[in-house]
Image: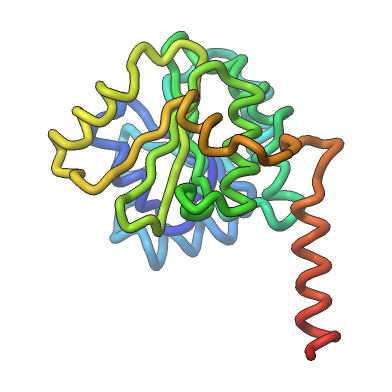
Amino acid sequence: MVGSGSFEAVAQALPAARHVTSVEIDPVVAAAGLRYLSGGRTPEHEPKWSIEIDDAKHYIANLTGSVDVVALDIAGPFQRQVALLYTQEFYELIKRHLRPGGILSVPANGDFQKRPETASLIVTTLLSTFPDVFVVTRGNGRTSFAMAGTTLGFGKAELLKRMKAEGREDVVVYDRQDIQRHLQGRLIRPLSLANMDVVLKQGVDRLRRKFFKA
């Protein structure tokens, strides 16, 4: 689990996991989350949970084994340090450490149905790196996330069936072909170390709002 915050995602993952490792770059953020937001849950009381204070890129690059799931519980790619976790290079690093059938879960940061710039960029980058990609969007369109892997072993129909069995009737699922049709006609360069335009654009927009108000 990359990123911590409230550790809410950890609470969701623990019941089904053999072990959950939270990787957080900032020890102050981790300490604040444990003290104020975790509902009293700590690694000392959860033997299946550990916290590593490290840069996720460094931590994953130095893994000695492989993992079943990598979930990014992080903000959008609007600052350089965070944007590096959405790049082709980081996705390739994760792909090397996923077990066969392993899943990468990524927040799409927007309503993918409406094809916003950031969500489209994130999903395009996943398409450039992984053969299997799905986007799941709630029916109200407010939130979307993507999952990717090399041999996921399930399709759109199976994913929809599982979600509906869990009471999630309002979801819309896009598979790779759906995504490609949805983004057809848009020229989007995947996010990479050579293309960090999303960060530059965010900086320019902030300067414009602060100093050049109409």
Identify the residue at horizontal 49%, vertical 45% (top origin).
Answer: 107
- Is 30 above or below relative to 155? below
Whole-percent x and y of residue 23? 55, 40
**Total numbered labels placed on residues in the image:** 0
- Is 173 above or below relative to 169? above
Identify the residue at horizontal 80%, vertical 46% (top origin).
Answer: 196
Q: Is residue 52 left or right of residue 212?
A: left
Q: In this view, does 166 lie to the left or right of 117?
A: left
Whole-percent x and y of residue 53? 60, 43
Whole-percent x and y of residue 165? 13, 34
Identify the residue at horizontal 38%, vertical 40% (top origin).
Answer: 136
Q: Nearer the viewer, residue 129 or 32?
A: 129
Coloring scheme used: rainbow
- Is 53 above or below relative to 110? above
Identify the residue at horizontal 68%, vertical 23% (top origin).
Answer: 61
Return the residue found at the far bottom. Answer: 214
- Is 46 above or below relative to 148? below
Quadrant including the C terminus: bottom right
The quadrant in which residue 39 appears is: bottom left
Whole-percent x and y of residue 88? 71, 29
